[in-house]
Image (spheres, rainbow, N blue to C red):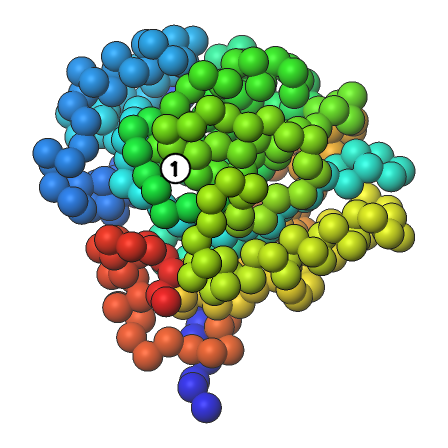
Amino acid sequence: MPESTRMDFTFRSLIENRVGTVWQREFNRLWPAYKRWFLRYGESDRPTYFESVQALREYMPEFLPSYEAMVEAAGGGDHAARFLAHYKPPPLFRGCSQAVYIKDEPVIVRNYDYSPYVFDGLLMKSHFDQRSVIAMIDCMSGALDGMNEDGLAISMSFGGREEFGDGFGITLLIRYMLEYATNVKEAVELVKDIPIHGAYNLTLLDAEASHVTLEIAAGQATRVTRAAIATNHQQLGNWPLYEEKVQTELRYQHLDQLTTQQQDNAESFASRFLQPPLFNTQFARGFGTLYTSAYYPCRRECHYLWPNKQWRFNFQNFAETEYHISFIDPEGYSDQSGAYAEVYTSNRVPGLAF
């Protein structure tokens, strides 16, 4: 029997209005690792600063002042500026399950399944531009999931396709929608023509209980659906090896059953994500549930759940705090450094040791 693998990890919640010293401190701490990831295929494989800014100016002009503030806080360097634009970044293959559930009140719940070796664990309440946003941040300028003060909530899952192309990283798109849209309709209109570099499923919910799932793939028009569930596959295109390893169909069918039966209230539905098959523990292989998030648009509340802990925040009551957790993989992994290195260097599936 393999020995279990344990990794101690700290989640932190932070408050920053305009981009400032808090954001700068975290960027300086994380930049060495992010720079290695960003340049792992060589500098020439990444777009130039001019190309990156031109793309932002064409597709997300409203975001330019916040982007420029981030670049300045990061020291104004060329590599940092290109990284923060999230234009044509290196590919990433995350897992994740997400679902909208509407019974006593609307909620969107998601599990973030990935490797703790390359995860920041930073939840931030910010007001970078037009509205307040609570989000789990990614690559400092993006967001993994979140909600804004108007009640628009968004979560993301990888779409289960090998192809990557030209476009922006998905987490910058999430940040952009949270900053500049008040509801689902506005968010869809805002991003419908923005190119994204890979395949992802975005599920959106607003305070009027309107919801959609966007199926995004490189080089293809975004497909807007009324689906309330998304795991790691899409209607068009598949990747059988990946789908089998992450059990995307099993998780999808489980969520479909839960949402159809309607036996839970909103909060008990969220707790279902802390149980198999939605909850995963293959942390050393890049497929462990790092956190569960639940967004309640009507009451503007954001909950973050772990098996033995829960954070509850809203826009009037948000505290800076820490949560220390040990991620334990019962299967173990024989080479921790190898698992870490694979996330940064694999040409096929970073973070998923097949």
**Relative depth, front residue between 301 and 100:** 100
Q: Could you tell me which residue is drawn at 23 percent across and 26 percent down? A: 82
Count the numbered circles shown.
1
Q: Residue 197 lies in what quarter of the image?
A: top left
**Relative depth, front residue between 251 and 105:** 251
Q: Could you tell me which residue is drawn at 54 percent across and 38 percent down? A: 201
Q: Could you tell me which residue is drawn at 65 percent across and 53 percent down? A: 252
For the view shown, which residue lies furthest in the front direction? 236
Q: Is residue 193 visible?
A: yes
For the view shown, which residue lies furthest in the bottom direction? 1
Residue identifier under label 1:
198
User: Is residue 308 toward the left or the right of residue 10 in the image?
Assistant: right
User: Is residue 282 toward the left or the right of residue 141 in the image?
Assistant: right
Image coordinates of residue 136 in percent, x first then y, are 51, 38
Q: Residue 115 lies in what quarter of the image?
A: bottom left
Q: Amino acid at mark 1?
A: Gly
| Figure check: 154 above or below 293 | above
Residue neighbourhood size for the residue with mark 1, other residues' Cα within 10 Å, grouped as few (<14), some (14–19), many (≥20): many
**Relative depth, front residue between 67 and 242:** 242
Q: Residue 242 lies in what quarter of the image?
A: bottom left
Element under disc 1 = loop
| Figure check: 322 above or below 108 | below
Q: Could you tell me which residue is drawn at 65 percent across and 20 percent down? A: 184
User: Is residue 243 toward the left or the right of residue 230 in the image?
Assistant: left
Image coordinates of residue 23 in percent, x first then y, are 38, 30
User: Is residue 132 toward the left or the right of residue 241 in the image?
Assistant: right
Image coordinates of residue 202 in percent, x first then y, are 56, 34
**Relative depth, front residue between 164 and 317:** 164
Q: Is residue 136 visible?
A: no
| Figure check: 189 above or below 273 | above
Quadrant of the snapshot with the C terminus? bottom left
